[in-house]
Structure formats: C-alpha cells, structure tokens
Amino acid sequence: MTALMAGTVSATASSPPQPNELSETTRLADRRSLVVGDRAYAMGDESGLYPATGWHIRGEMGGFWTQPIKLLDGLWFGLDGKWLGKDVTAAKYTSGHGYSRIDYSGAVQVRRTDFVPDGLRATLVGLTLTSATAKTVSLDVDAHSELMSSYPWGWTKPSAADANLPDTGAYTNGSLNFRDRDYAAYVGSSLRPTNHALGPNHRGPQDPAVICPADGTTPARCDDSLVGKGTGGRLTYDVALKPGREQTIWFAVAGSDDGAAAAQREYNRALANPGKLLQAKAAARQQIDQKTAVDLPGDRLLQQSVEWSKQNLADSVQEARNLRIRDVNEGKDYPAPVGTIDTARWFGAGFPDYPWIFATDGEYTSYAAVAAGQFDTVKAHLKALRDISDLLNARSGKVAHEIVPTGDVYFGSNQSAGNTDETVKFPSIVALLWRWTGDDHVRDDFYDFSVRNLQYVYRELDKDNDGWLEGLANVERSGMGAEKLDSTVYLARGLRDLADLAASKHDRKIQQWATARAADLESRFEAQWWVPQALGYADSVDDPANPANDNTPIFQRHWTGVTPMEAELVRPGQPTSPLASSEHAATALTQREKPCYTGEFGLFHTGTGPTSDAAGNPGASCDPVVSQVKSERSIFSLNTSIMAVAEGNYGRLGKDQQQVYTTGNARIQLDPKVWETPGAMPEIAPSPDSPANIGRPFYDRSMSLQAWGTYGVLWPVVHQQLGVDPDLGRNRIAVVPQLPAGQTKVAGSNIRLGRGSIDVAARLAGKELRTDLTVHNLKADFTVGAVIPVGAKLNNLTLNGRATPYQIVTTTRGTEVHVTARGSAALRITLT
C-alpha cells in the first residue's frame, strides 16, 4: 500500500499485492462492501455505488455513519463525465485487513481505497489515478447527505419519518457542509475545487433516485427511502497526470452530532495526513493478525478463517459518547432519559442493521474474542452492559437486551419479558475474562453486578420455585413453554461461574448459595429435560401457571437443543464438562448431524419432522416426534457455532462431526462460490429457507458481517484443538491439545494469556504424540498434556527428555494425559 501513504496527493510507484487480501471480480454491483473503524463505518456496493440498504430504517442503513448518526447516503466519483461503477466498470473488489479497494478499467486506471481511521469520526477514500500519457482530467465528486439518528426506526412511534428533518447544504472553504440540528457532515479534499454545485440530488449515476416504498412490492434495487430528507452537492477538480505516474487524492467524509465545529475538527484531522492514518490502521491490524496465529496443515481453510475471524472481531468494535438511556418499550414509548453514559464501547452485533449493543450477541462473541487476545473490548462490552443496565433497571440486576448508540433501549427493562438467558450468562463472561487475563480488577469490578444478576432471576423469574426460570430466551416460537432450555443451561453454568468468583473473593455465603443452586439443577436436569423418543433435549417446558401441564417437556427441534452440550461448567475438583451426560450427548449430537437438522453450511434453526430430510426425501432417519412448529431450515452462523463447540466438548473432531460446522462457517466467510463480502462472516448462510443475500434486494438482506459466527471458529481451534484452558485468576494454565481425526499437526503462536503469551504445537509422528509448549512472560502452574487418540494406549512418556509422573484423566473429550510443568515444555507420548 505504499502508493497510498504519501499524503493527500501522492505520486509514487505502484505497490505490490498484499498477502492478507481476498478479491472478487463477479457481480460486484450485487455485493455489499464494508469498512469499519471504532467511530465510523461505511457501506455501499462493491462497484462503488450506494443502493438503498437495510431494513431497520428501510433503505437507510448503508452509506456513511458515525455512531449514533448517519452522515451520507453515498459518495460518487466521475472522470471526464463518466461515473465510476456505471460508465467505468469496476473490475475487482478487494477486502484487506482494515481497508477495501476497487480497481476500475478505463483509459485512466483508477484504484479506490476506503478505510476508517480508529479514533476518528471520519471515513477516508483515496483515488489513485494513472495515465499512460500526460493529461488533465476533470474529477467530479457527488455527495448526498442524510443526517439522521440511528433511532427511531421505520415502525416505532415516533418513526424515523417523524424524527428526520430536512438537511441543508453549503459550500465553505473547498468543502461541502451539511446540517440538521446539531448533526453536521463535512465532505471534501485538501485539493482546491475548480467548481462546486449544490442541490437536492447529486447522487452521481443514481440520479434521478428510485425511491423504496415503505413496504409491499418494491423495485429490486432502489436509491433512497421515503424517510430520506437529505440534500446534495458536487465538487469538481482538475487533476494533472504525468505519464505512468500514480497520483492519489484523498477525500474525507466526517461528522458529528455535536455541531458543525466538532464535525470540522474531525474532517481536518482526517485530511491532515491520510497516509499516516492508513499506516497506523495497517499496523494495528497487523498486531491483531500476529496474535493467535495458527498453523493447521490438515485444514488450511479453517486456518484462514481464524485469520479473518480475528479481523471480523476488530471490524465489529464500535464506540459512542453521551448515550441518553431511556426505555422505549419496543418502540412504543419515548420517555425522558434516566441518565447518561459518557462513553460506551462494544462489539457491534452485525452490519448494517445491528451495529449496536446486544447482550446475547456480545456474550457469545466474548469466547471468540478472548481466544483472539482481544481482552479490552470484552471488558468494555461488559462495562457498557453493566452501566446501562444499572441505570435503566435501577440496579435490579437485569441485563438490558438491545441498546441503540443513542441510548434508547428497545428491549430489556424491568418492565419487559427478557431475555432471561443473557442475564444468567453475564457472570460467565466475567469469569471467562478473569480466567484468561488473571486480572482481579475485572473480577472485582463486575462481581457485585454478577451476584445481582442471579439473585434477580431467582427473585423475579421462578414463580413456581422449581429452579427452571421463566422468560424469553434465544428462540421465541409458538407453542413454547414459559421455561426455556437455553436459559436453564446457561443458568447452571452461571451459577458455577459465580461460585468460582465468590470462592476467589472468600465470599462463602454467595459461594455456598450458588453451588447449592447449581448442584440442585444438575441433579434434576436429565430427568426433566431429556426426551427419549426425540433423541434430544426439550426446547422448553410447559407453562407453570397451568398445574395440569406443569413441567411437561415440549420438543420443537430448535437449535437451542444443542446448548446442553455447548456450555461448559466449572466444578471444583472435577474436569470441566458440559451439562449433558456423555451418553445423552452422543445420542443428541449424532441426531443433529443428520440431514433433518444439518444442511450444507451447518445447523438449521429448526430441524425438519419425521417425514422428510432437508432435501425433502421421505422416510429420513429422524426422530418420530410430531411437532406443530414448522421447520426453519435457515442456517445462522451462530447455530453452526453452537454445534461446532458442542462437538468439540465431547472430542468429536472428525470430518463428519465438528469439521462439518467449522467448515460451514469458514466457507460462508471465505469460499468465493458462497461469500457476499470476501472475508466477512455473515449472519445467515445460503439455506433452503433463506436464499443467498446476493440474490435478494439490498433492503431485505441479513447481515453481511455478524460477530457471533467467529465463536464457531476461534473457540474450537484455540480452546479445543489446541487445548488452551487458562485459570489465571488462580495462576493456573492447562494446555491439553486434541488432534482432529486424520490430522497430524495443529499449532498456534502468540496466544495471549494475561500479560504474556504461549505457543502450542501438537503433532502425531508415527506412534509418538507430541505437545510442545513455549511460554513468554508468564509465571504460572502449568498442566501440559494430550488427548489420546481413540483406540490407542500410552506406552511411554517423557517431559523435556526425562521420565516424569503423569495422570490419566477421563473427560468428555476422551482420555487425557496430564503432566505438571513449570513453564516451556516438550511432552512426548509413545503410543501402542
């Protein structure tokens, strides 16, 4: 990228291709592009145009944003009267780590590079022009504003149409300036325009705009919405080109919800040295790439997915200031704020329609993030959830579900029904981060809220006092009982994790309370929730308000039936294991691998019935239970992640087991035959009941990047295959790898633990099983080991070349060999 680093205007030699890039050349106008920084992001299509996108505010979720406001519908470029993306064809779109690039064919070669500097409320776009002959080209830049808040939405009261006001446009000192109340946007370059224009349109080749109706039959592609009240402008430049010399011109789109002066400061900062900002962005992403760097010679696709999943997590980080917290009651109310949060930072759930704060999404994503060494964002996400929830819910302990960056809480107040599962999961994420960092400040900061989480659910959500919580969870479908399986599973895990935190703080009262509750649930779980004729666990149990039906299991084949195998419980003095028994887990997982539950890219949301498989073949070998709920053969990257993790918890790493699901998520992210945005993990895979996004209108698609799918890639590789299991809160680290069947090596370097890191390599060479551990800047008590392959037996063992005592431990993963080590270690196990 050296050609793009010399400043606002550069003329340097062509840069070589970058190694960490993925490119696409087909159907670019049908694919979404995305660049993200922590204070801004932009979405268009991969030809450089900006179709109306998204559905929360229908057609308005794309374009240029800085939380919590939108700035522009789009930014268009024309050379000598020909618009890029329409008159000048886009030949190739490239996703890089932290940037995107579009190459155009034409008499003048054009390369467009977009990126968002972290810490700035601005997006930068660089146009690199090259001509074989000396010439001066006329460069037109169109911008169309849409200054509006991320809330309210299209269907709320008031709606986005009610709240959005007309923008005004002006030209000042070489830039376009747009205003709407305190919302402001600046667009321009440090070059001086030779001409400018203002007017209601200025959408480049997308004038006159096709308007998306609010609902009903709509065009396949439109340019603006009925909500839109923006205005436009054009900047024109004369650019002199020398023969064969590249020249790069940088443009900035910057804004603020704190007035024009604040927007102009962001604009000036962005254009002060774009090349330096791009270097900083590249360096930061390289640091991310260097953490948790894996070598999987038996599964290079999964290795590449780990690489891009780390970048997807970084691309999901968002930050907003001055969030005014209010309960809008699913869009029905608009009360005065109960307080203000100065700063919130979080993992945005998905782009373009969910780039805000979700408890459920962030809790799943945290497992991937700690495996990637991205501890700081996990901590920030927890803090945002805690602080917002305590303001909203008067310190009740209930976790808010969905928070827009304005501070509007759509769902999750004390007055709403849920979600129960995300309140009981919060203590587990605190324990997770504490174990991976060893930071007692993390434990202490979130301990009180974690206690209040579980006290709240027992006080408010167990009306019949049977220990199974009522309330909403991940799936809400007709016919479900009030008590949900996933809430039960995550409550059992949360109780064990809270007990662990309490024990470390010597809080015996809470430790004993949580332990007793957990033990009670665990002792009764199988009898209540296992449904033998369904070969699986009930999704819910019936309404406790009806004594005649109390605690009747209801089986509907939802993906949450896998959670008893997915969530691990930490019990003192016992191997960490999921809630499900090994016998029932084997039965349930084998059943879920069948085509009535699993499609080409992973696990269905809701499996099919006894009469057909996913392809409609009658007489498929599925459970005989009749359910009134229709199957939903949509494959979410989260559902597939849950299945991948569950398989790994029971040592099921084979090609027909975990690898089906890790490969499924990796393919929708990396396979050119499948992806929409190269390298981005989407929300939903192409599925029998969810057609591929690329064939759907831009205003009717699932998310092009959804953070939670990384859970099914990073956690299986780092925690299960490499066997990294830290307990740094107690200064302990276990590294017990398991090689997937048929593979001879898995390795990872710079896996961040606390303030240090480890390198791990597991190999099978003939009859010798090897685990090599290298420790960097860590002092802890280490357990090093391996999972013995099925059918093999230990014959001999050495540690660092010497015979040493060892333990044989039976776990749900299989037979494990454990050896105590003081640090870096070379374990050799001879098998028979």
Image: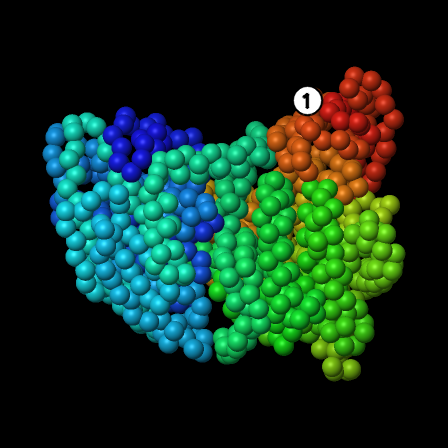
Q: 119 or 555, which is in the foreground?
A: 119
- Height in image: 489 above or below 823? below
Colour convention: rainbow
Outermost residue, top direction? 801
The residue shown at (74%, 22%) is: 826
Q: Residue drawn 81% across and 54% down?
A: 502
Check disc 1 and give the amino acid type. Ala
Residue at image x 17%, y 36%?
Answer: 108
Residue 587 to residue 548: above or below? above
Q: Quadrant of the C terminus?
A: top right
The quadrant of the rendering that contains the N terminus is: top left
Residue of label 1 = 765
Q: Is residue 185 above or below residue 669?
A: below
Q: Is residue 527 visible?
A: yes
Left or right: 361 in relation to 164: right
Q: Is residue 579 left or right of residue 48?
A: right
Residue 90, image x, y percentages: 26, 43
As displayed, is residue 39 above or below residue 777? Answer: below
For label 1, the crowd category at 10 Å Cα-Cα, with few meaning under 14, some 14 to 19 and many 20 or more, is few
In x, y percent, where is residue 505? 82, 51
**Dot 1 lies on which element?**
strand
